[in-house]
Amino acid sequence: MANSRIRNTKRLLGLAAVFILCALAGSALLSFRSSAESEALTATFIDVGQGDAILVSTHDGHHMLVDGGPRAAGARLAETLDRMGVTHLDMLVSTHPHEDHIGGLIEVLDCLTVGTVADSAKPHTTATYESYLTKIYEKGIPFSAPRAGDSFSLGNAEVRVLWPTEPLPPDINDCSLVLEVIYGKSRVLLTGDISGYTERTLAGEGSLDRINLLKVAHHGSRSSTTQTFLAATSPDVAVIQVGTGNDYNHPSDQALANLRSRDALVYRTDEHGHVTVKLRSDGRTWSVNIEKPGDDLRAACGSKVFHTKTCPYAKRIAPAREMVIFDREQALNAGYRPCKACNP
Ligand SMILES: [Zn+2]
Ligand SMILES: [Zn+2]
Ligand SMILES: [Zn+2]
């Protein structure tokens, strides 16, 4: 193990101790406003079209980005992270070297500071993967290849690595790092692009817990999200990261039907935009917020200035005069300009 921050589960500090240390550190997550709301673990499934990008944030201001979408979405992803007030990632994870997971990470590595990279280390020879590796090397960021049984802390949450094991499977998707994020009694499972083969292996080993939130494997492809896997995990909320009109017919009817039969609430980034799930530590309380890109901008009828919907000036707009701006570029072309206070 190249990285000393990643250690075996048996040597983990008690969660209580971790929590106290982080409470003392006392940093604040800028994107949160009310203190009641801030006592939560947040997973934001960022809309990057066809691909995965999940930001996991603790309320004491620690961030882990799991995958970065395709290269074409890199600038948008970096801009979204900036808007969320994220300038440093404790951990940057690439689940496996496919372009729809690592392409956007190149831009992220340019714009944000990163503590450690966790990577599947599955050999792959594309130009995109090489550019990403070169960037990590040039910046001198510690690189690790965690395996099942490893774990690390993210602020007051614990991240357990459930997969892969050595030797790595021949299929690249099945080499995906599978991470379970544990926050008190709440659990989030991030599955990369694993297939039913890995899902059944994990279920058969007894490695799976009942979870609150699932990142649906492989964009809802029909080879994943098996009944065996869902019976073992029984997620309350499931999020599918998928692009509108993608070439793969993701998500599949079968995966959707399997999720429905388990009463999971399903969200998809092609329909709902950015999907933010906040989980309290009690294992029972969560909220889901959806945000179609552009839906956060407001302008008053008769004014040529647009705001974020949380800007004090936006809040003063009378409901009858409030306009939602769906497309920032379109607004700029139409002669609108961003507010100097909220800088949308
Ligand atoms: Zn993928
Ligand atoms: Zn893949
Ligand atoms: Zn404003």
Image (spheres, grey):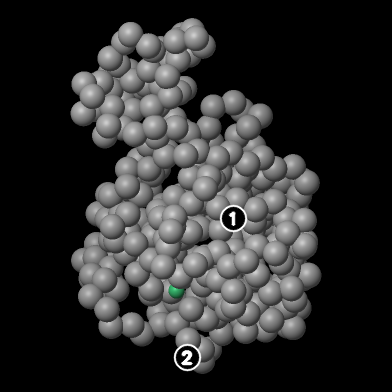
Q: Which comes sooner in the sequence, label 1 or label 2? A: 2
Residue at image mark 2:
170
Where residue 334 appears, x then y in whole percent? 23, 24
The answer to which image quadrant residue 309 occupies is top left
For the residue pair 322 and 182, the one nearer the viewer reads as 322
Asked if the residue under mark 2 is in contact with the one under mark 1, i.e. CB atoms within 8 Å, the reply is no
Where residue 184 appears, x then y in whole percent? 72, 51
For the residue pair 206 and 322, the one nearer the viewer reads as 322
Q: Secondary structure at mark 1?
A: strand
The answer to which image quadrant residue 314 occupies is top left
Where residue 199 appears, x then y in whole percent? 65, 77
**Considering the image in quadrants, where does the C terminus appear?**
top left
Q: Secondary structure at mark 2?
A: loop
Amino acid at pointer 1:
Val
Q: Is residue 296 above or below residue 192?
A: above
Q: Is mark 1 within 8 Å of ligand 1?
A: no
Residue at (60%, 45%) from the top-left corner? Answer: 277
Residue at image mark 1:
239
Where residue 42 appears, x then y in whole percent? 58, 45
The answer to whether one can see residue 303 in this image is yes
Amino acid at pointer 2:
Pro
